Amino acid sequence: AQSVTQPDIHITVSEGASLELRCNYSYGATPYLFWYVQSPGQGLQLLLKYFSGDTLVQGIKGFEAEFKRSQSSFNLRKPSVHWSDAAEYFCAVAGNAGKSTFGDGTTLTVKP
Amino acid sequence: EADIYQTPRYLVIGTGKKITLECSQTMGHDKMYWYQQDPGMELHLIHYSYGVNSTEKGDLSSESTVSRIRTEHFPLTLESARPSHTSQYLCASSELPGANTGELFFGEGSRLTVL
């Protein structure tokens, strides 16, 4: 069975500081991996995805993520956080039949 | 930009009422999903569909039902709402025919409150 773990429930960073959100997955084959962002009262929006090839993927809003098979990780990074990045972030893995399993999410707070 | 719409966005109703949450997408996607999201943020898959006349139960048991009579439409119905059904319901779709990427496109959600 596939699963996703986001170890950090809540992260606070100062505006302009760098950010890393952790994600570990469990899946028997090569996974399809995603990061989504959710603003308050909204649905989820795709930030970036990994299917194959280059293990460093670029996404929207200046985010990137690195796939590390040996660590079963897909951590999300941003070099300089903006106040508008405050939101909930979800890591997900898609397996057979396209069903996605989500992590529990990480709440990002940005301090001025 | 994704074209998937949910109505109503917000609904407050009394116990025992029947409600239907609408979800429509204009992308021609085969697969559609309903997720339930409680205040603790976790998303739980409650229903999914691989195409017309296909419906399956998700990972989380739900008293709701769904139908898929048309490709673009995937409504969710509660025959008799209870306070325990209070939650946010997110509809999503994925995959043009022949594709298999698993990327989900979400609607903005329907927040249901049952008094």
Image (cartoon, coloured by chain):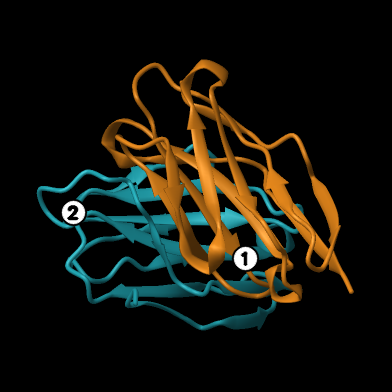
Q: Which mark is residue B88?
A: 1
Q: Which residue is mark 2?
A: B51
The residue sitting at 31% across, 41% down in the picture is A98
Amino acid at circle 2 = Gly
Residue B78 seen from this side: no
Seen in the picture, residue A5 relative to B64 is either above or below; the reply is: above
**Element type where label 1 sits in the image:** strand
| Mark nearer the N terminus (1 vs 2) | 2
The residue sitting at 36% across, 68% down in the picture is B75
The x, y position of residue B62, in whole percent, is: 53, 48
Amino acid at circle 1 = Gln
Which image quarter holds the C terminus of chain A? bottom right
State the cyan chain. B
State the orange chain. A
| Quarter holding residue B112 | bottom right
Residue in the foreground of this view, choosing between A73 and A87: A73
Q: The disc numbered 2 marks a residue on which chain?
A: B
Q: The disc numbered 1 marks a residue on which chain?
A: B
Residue in the foreground of this view, choosing between A73 and B94: A73
